[in-house]
Image (tube, coloured by chain):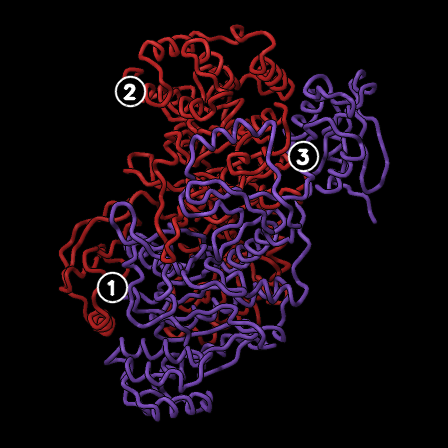
Chain colours: A purple, B red
Amino acid sequence: MRWSRSVVMVACLIGGGRTFLNQPVGRRRMPRVMFATQQGRASAAVKQQQEMGKVAQSEKLEVVPPRGTRDFYPEEMRVRTWLFGEWRAAAARHGFEEYDSPILESEALYTRKAGEEVTQQLYNFEDKGGRRVSLRPEMTPSLARMVMARRNGLPMPLKWFSIPQCWRFEKPSRGRRREHYQWNMDIWGVEGVTAEAELLAAVVGFFEAVGLTSEDVGIKVNSREVLAEVLRSVAGVDADEEPARFAATCVLVDKLDKLPPSALYDDFAQASGMSSDDVDALVDALDSSTFDDLPVGSRARRDLTELFDLADAYKIADWLVFDAKIVRGLAYYTGIVFEGFDRSGKLRAICGGGRYDQLLATFGGEALPAVGFGFGDAVVMELLEMKGLVPQTVDAVDVLAFPFAADDPDLSADLGRAAATVAATLRRHNLNVDLVLQGKKPKAAFKQADRRRAALVVMVAPEEWQNGDLVVKDMALGTQATVPLDDLADYVIRARADPPKG
Amino acid sequence: MRWSRSVVMVACLIGGGRTFLNQPVGRRRMPRVMFATQQGRASAAVKQQQEMGKVAQSEKLEVVPPRGTRDFYPEEMRVRTWLFGEWRAAAARHGFEEYDSPILESEALYTRKAGEEVTQQLYNFEDKGGRRVSLRPEMTPSLARMVMARRNGLPMPLKWFSIPQCWRFEKPSRGRRREHYQWNMDIWGVEGVTAEAELLAAVVGFFEAVGLTSEDVGIKVNSREVLAEVLRSVAGVDADEEPARFAATCVLVDKLDKLPPSALYDDFAQASGMSSDDVDALVDALDSSTFDDLPVGSRARRDLTELFDLADAYKIADWLVFDAKIVRGLAYYTGIVFEGFDRSGKLRAICGGGRYDQLLATFGGEALPAVGFGFGDAVVMELLEMKGLVPQTVDAVDVLAFPFAADDPDLSADLGRAAATVAATLRRHNLNVDLVLQGKKPKAAFKQADRRRAALVVMVAPEEWQNGDLVVKDMALGTQATVPLDDLADYVIRARADPPKG
């Protein structure tokens, strides 16, 4: 075993030839070291590779994952598992059921012409059967497909959630990868804003559970009907008569968050037939628009009033802010839209959602009221790290079982088998047990016990084992006891149920 | 709302025109019904679609998922969550840590020339940046890449597991989809068969936990060195001298499980230079080979003897069977190989694994001992269903909160808000609460409570609520109590901690 060598070698087979590169990899910096030819046990395999040859003609065999993607080593996986667990717990508290769909979908599911980022950046391709497919950029179209497929058999309303990995193809930049995980929660079959309120309560429920407050995070709320009103008055665009033009305009308004109006004059002219004066008037109107400007009796005013009243009832009103500029960048939203944001203003949107009552109709089905949100893993993790709210996660084991036989190279004999029996016995009592599988000195075994946060170390020592006894060390107390194998499981269960204080 | 209509309509925009098809979809049969034009609320969306037009020129917008893939509706997702939970629990009992890697990898990671099914059926393609990539067909190469990238920083031995979705591109058939989930467990850095034994113990630990016995399932065990011995004597192939030829021969021997030798004569001739007589002699030798035929002092004999001794120590010997014909179909195995099988002989292999000490070397790195297995979700679920061992899974909620106002169309007012407060209060006490979001008659609300297996229904009734009280019905006991809002959380927590017997 030579895993302590501080060198990572990458074999690159370029153009049929064979060269070796060393390069720093992963997130930790590793020293650059010159290549040294591998000898000995690797030789047969090197031959095997030479014979098999031609591992791609023009690509390096990389140890880094594909561009814009991540590996999850155990320490990163634990954090992901923690985050997913908090999402799942918030979903369960709010009575949502989990579903999933294939990560690969027919490209047609995403073909919309409203200029959305999500459809412009599809990770799409032609499969070997000649079909146009795409890694899913978002979950809502898959959900709509699933609802449509079993429409007559599903008990409404649906309250469903999922944690899909979603993909896009764009140049990766800091914090913008080609894949992310996205908590999705949706309610189908409810026309009123009770559904929006329930979703907002779930989002806030998650924030509260991970320790974020309404001073850290807010949620901007609007209705697309506010924009429809403004558009009608400044540019004569009628959202009801020209839904596609309205959808494309919404996508452009969403971009005003990042770009100056002048940068979008041409796009507005093309998509909405609006002059640059119209665009400036639109921006002014949205900037100055307050809740009270909404026409009395309009659906937007009624929806928003009801929603803020419900927020009071849920005790989440502190988190909500009306903002007429929020429209979100997806074409299919039709009513209330919302967006979670970091109050310090440093980060991109944390989550976003809205009502999309017409999506099934655009798929050729019968319209069905629906509202939902997507909540990515990247921005919220940045925020939680900024606030020091990411917990120290550990995968602790109850016991490390250790054959005390550092000088015995033939571990599978004798004490090794005894340690296997010890581990098997404890595991059949549902205890989590790591087992030392090689000859190790006690110091190394206790280091392993520390790393795996073992509560107890059970040593199979030659003399004690002759009498059928084990030596049990409590890692927190530092105490040692001699316990017969027959009593061991009970002993460990008692020790775990009554852990030492302090 | 018209979700009770028993018709699913699929809009197909073919060649720019607009036709509608009805077709049975999903797993449940749905009646074929003639298309009826959608009117009313869908009209704007239909216009939107007409304007956006051209939803792919030659594809139907399908409500079924892509060929060979699955949707997971909540009832299927619960079973998947149960299975993954059992896998994770078995991994935890054996001290394994979870990791993950991207579902998309560089194609070069899988380019091996040994004729394996796994590389012949790659779900590969060229991405928009011109890179050859593939949906992962198996997890081991990704794991090897991750180990190689941080080789000097990882504490050995590693005991890691993962539950990746893996893909292949082939014609789907019954039970053979294009994707499956695969429990992977691997140990790196251990040369001896203590690692194999630990993995076999984990597999058996899972079987035992889900109620399977050694009468239902067995695990065939062999070493590729047994095949190497036989090949040397019948055909003069030297595995050490010609590892690539040996690997390709192993892949062919694996196919003898499904095909008669005569069907593979040509392949053997090409890959191994073996005559048909050589092949027949090989088959005879493997068929008749017993444990005692292994040369005394050979590594195969030592490894297998040790492994079966360790199996005794783990008390899993009943599950194991020596079988010289088992070689597994992956090129990179070098030592012990094993395969879980259904003793009734009806199903394909349940799981498979082995030692692959040379994989890092074939990637141009330094060899590192490793052993692992893959365990798909499909066959084991077939087996568990055959045996009646799939549990009835439910996502039960603690409480259904219900505004008792069937005749009040304006639910978000008054009682709706009160119900929101009730739900929010209970959820902040970590209780799982479904909330009725629309005007519903009591019968419908109680049906919802039954479906979600609510333990309690909390009714916000007009008269009681005037005094700040709720009516709580215990769904198991059928009893009712009137409880003030301030006491409600305590009341529910007590009722859940002390559920009624019988």
Task: Tell me which numbered mark, 1 or 3, is placed earlier along the sequence.
Answer: 3
Q: Amino acid at mark 2?
A: Asp
Residue for point 36% across, 78% down: A250
The answer for which chain carries disc 3 is A
* Nearer-the-camera pick, B383 or A251: A251
In space, the residues marked 3 and 2 are separated at their CA atoms by 42 Å
Q: Helix or strand or loop: what does disc 3 sit on?
A: loop
Q: Helix or strand or loop: what does disc 2 sit on?
A: helix
Q: Which residue is mark 1?
A: A366
- Residue B234 makes an appearance in the image: yes
Is B239 rendered above or below residue B400?
A: above
* Nearer-the-camera pick, B334 or A234: B334
Q: Which residue is mark 3?
A: A2
Q: Which residue is mark 2?
A: B266
- Residue B75 makes an appearance in the image: no
- Quadrant of the rendered image containing residue A244: bottom left
Of badges 1 and 3, the one in the foreground is 3
Q: Amino acid at mark 1?
A: Glu
In space, the residues marked 1 and 2 are separated at their CA atoms by 57 Å
Label 2 crowd bin: few (<14), some (14–19), many (20+), radius 10 Å: some
Residue for point 73% across, 26% down: A439
